[in-house]
Image (cartoon, rainbow, N blue to C red):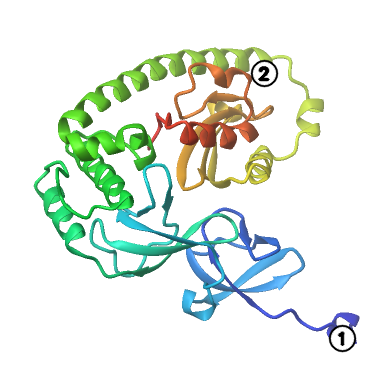
Amino acid sequence: MDYRDFLAKQEPLVLPYFGGTRVDAKARTFRVEGQPALGWWRFQIDGRRAVPTEPASAHDIDLGSLPVLRGHWVDGWVVVDGKTLGKIALPPDDEPAPLSRVTARRWYSGDVLFETTEFEDDAELAAREALEHGRPLGDVKGVVPSLRAAFGYALGIAAARELSIDVTPRELASRVIAIADGGRAVVTEMFEALVEQRRREAEETRRRIAEAEQAARLAGAVRGARVVERARDPVQRADEALASARARMLSCRRVAGGAQLDVTYHVDGERIMSIVDAQTLQVIDPGVCLSGAHRVLTLDAMPSVVREAIDDDALNITRHH
């Protein structure tokens, strides 16, 4: 009989899968086998591997010990105040109405899980009516800070959709209270500056990519098998670089004849798309406005750069698709 037959089999774990190559438990991180759909799964644990065996539910475990977030619902986000908000990683079965009071929990990985919708009062109803008519919040009574911020985010996102401008809530953070109080005039002024910054960044990005492609063609003439042999799979290296920086790689594709990687990843709920050199992981197109600072960055530094931009209310994502 094989000695492994005497070993006790580990109990399966119910864990949320948010995408990528890993899942997080309370004290450990496991590499996922296969590509399950996003959601709750029962995983059989085999060493450092987690094998999904069947779909599960959040009701199968107790989330009560996890840190709680209370705020208002805006387009898949929980707004706690003007600067604190969390992206719901797994959409609820029934999406709350805009500006609903909600409760969420923060998983061990930092991802935010929806918990419940709470009772609302007259302030939420009045704010929702103002939002539906595109009016500023004005002098609505009983508005708590999270509702005022949520209203500003919701009004900004609604205006962005009408104008076909891609934004995430965090790109509105610097003016969110002004938007709530001043309405569409404030949004229009903000978007003019946002779009102009993106236009300048796009011009610079096109120039950088052309330079990188030319450099790759020249390097290809002298690059020997020795360089190829020493390099591990660049996609795996990109995944590990992001994981070490507390980010999650969602997808990666080779471009420019394999000389570059187009990497999509999550940083604290934000979806970022960056183009990097396949060998060095040096950033060619960061996917966010950095005013040229990317020239000294590699992929593993990008999550910190994005977090700093979030903290400074300066996030401007140039690649949403």
Residue 45 relative to residue 4: left or right: left
Residue shown at 54% from the left, 12% from the top: 211
What kind of element bears circle 1? helix
What kind of element bears circle 2? helix
Q: From the viewer's perspective, is residue 159 above or below residue 10?
A: above
Residue, far left: 133
Q: From the viewer's perspective, is residue 95 above or below residue 201?
A: below
In the rendered image, which residue does mark 2 sit on?
220
Percent of width and height locating residue 160: 23, 37
Q: From the viewer's perspective, is residue 25 above or below residue 210?
A: below
118, 201: nearer the viewer? 118
The disc, 2 or 1, on the residue closer to the chain's N-terminal end is: 1
Percent of width and height locating residue 269: 46, 48
The amino acid pointed to by label 1 is Phe
Quadrant of the frame with the N terminus: bottom right
Residue 25 relative to residue 172: left or right: right
179, 122: nearer the viewer? 122
Quadrant of the frame with the C terminus: top left
Structural distance between the alpha carbons of marks 2 and 1: 54 Å
In the rendered image, which residue does mark 1 sit on?
6
